[in-house]
Image (spheres, rainbow, N blue to C red):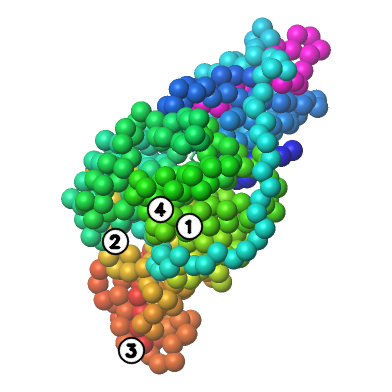
Amino acid sequence: MSKVRSGMSALRAVLAGAGMLLCMVVLAAPAFGQTLAGRWTAEGRKLDNGEQEKSILELKQNGNQLTGTLKTLGFEVDVKGTATGNHFELFIEEWNPNRPVLVGDLVNGELHAMEGGRRPIVAKPATAADDIPAVAYIEPPALKPVPENGLAKTPPMGWNSWNIFQGRIDDQTVRTMADAMITSGMRDAGYIYVNIDDTWQGVRDAQGNLPANHKFPDMKALADYVHSKGLKLGIYSGPGTRTCAGYPASLGHEEQDAKMFAAWGIDYLKYDWCSAGRMYKNEALQPVYQKMGVALQATGRPIVYSLCEYGMGGVEKWGPQVGGNLWRTTGDIRDSWESMIGNVEKQVPTAPYAGPGRWNDPDMLEIGNGKMTDDEYRTHMSLWALVASPLLAGNDIRTMSDVTKSILLNKEVIAIDQDALGKQASPVKNGDLETWVKPLADGSVAVGVVNMGSAAAQATVKAADLGFAGPVKKARDLWAHQDVKFAAGAYTATVPSHGTLLLRVSAK
Ligand code: GLA
């Protein structure tokens, strides 16, 4: 089946704030001999632009095995699951094979379910009229390299609304977050971009212009405010008809939208594949992303271009040629150790392609969002710095704790991420310990030893493994904020479970 969003957290888009879609999975109660097979529909939430989200669930049943697809305005994914009598559980394996997205029962010909374990949903048998509207296919342009835009010579740093707020983002929240970027010291540490993610969009008018919805009464005034604070403003769209949360996207309006973004004073665009998967195959990723890359450059405004395509299509090889500065190499991060580690480990094949102006993006930070331990969040920050990832905080900067601040604002770790050489580390595994080494512009190296095990462990860093000709002259523990000594060519320290020993080591 066609898969629109491969491996991203569309579910999250749904479950989380924009959250409308999944809600539709309903199954008609199989009376004796019936199955859960069929087409089911449910209404999702009303979007912030007044439109109605909806979902279509198509299921096949073979014994107690269920397979099918879930379609919403913004995406289409495969579902799989089991039926036990009238009871069913459905999973979207590419998002999370361990946690069902819908659990429920067939009751009187309807599917009564809990979406994501939280939201009650009732789905009814769909009629032919219940469908997600098809869209006229637009042929992608011929390939033609887009010149580099000269931006993002080091990985972009800032804040993005999605991980913490999903659909609960508005003008006032962005303003207060911009204020907090200054009072917290984030701006001065380099976190410059304040990025609005999905759900800002209104409804396209007769001239094809896409205004913001009621949550953003004056986008230009908001950009002026953010700029007055010495920050930059980012926004979000996608190459399909709809964003992942079901809002209008840029298909067929690329130049118009790019001009509008430039006129508002936008400095950064995240462009999310989502519903583009309904009309295009993966081969179209490059030309489709090129189209917006050209449109952005034609505006004459410097706009960082962030591709969001969940690592599909070998993006690290062609991202720069479409004018991109960064591209997602994974599905959506969640605030969990497994998700965070899973995303960073997927960086390995992309390492040779990173460099100034062109960054692999294992997704935004979850530091401070509460579901990982402080050691795990320090590991998150260490690893994102070692792989030269964009650093887009995804927490509430206004209320962050001192520990969260000490992690996000660790200048010595930020310096590893922002190093001018732009090299991306890869891991060497030894039992529970993973060692990541990143060469730096001044000839020193950053080395991180991550303890993947469930108990504290001794980690030894050997100078010989760091590629130095001579002995170590200086070594510093970047979390302890102190210099340490190599003796007989090695340094050993205890690393807590899921913690990281992060050193900057120099032979000069
Ligand atoms: C996708 C992206 C996320 C976020 C949501 C918004 O899931 O991968 O980062 O932008 O869409 O709907």
In the image, 499 versus 86, the foreground residue is 86
Q: Residues within 10 Å of mark 4 (few under 14, many from 20)?
A: many
Identify the residue at horizontal 52%, vertical 22% (top origin): 52
Say whether disc 2 or disc 4 marks the residue closer to the N-terminus.
2
Identify the residue at horizontal 64%, vertical 27% (top origin): 132
Q: Tell me the mark number nearer the camera, choosing from 4 and 1.
A: 1
Q: Is residue 234 visible?
A: no
Identify the residue at horizontal 46%, vertical 49% (top origin): 258
Which residue does the numbered mark 3 point to in the structure image?
Answer: 508
Which residue does the numbered mark 2 point to in the structure image?
Answer: 190
Q: Tell me the mark number nearer the camera, choosing from 3 and 4.
A: 4
Q: Residues within 10 Å of mark 2 (few under 14, many from 20)?
A: some
Quote the CA–CA distance across marks 3 and 4: 39 Å
Say whether disc 3 or disc 2 marks the residue closer to the N-terminus.
2
Quote the CA–CA distance across marks 1 and 3: 46 Å
What's the amino acid at mark 2? Answer: Gly
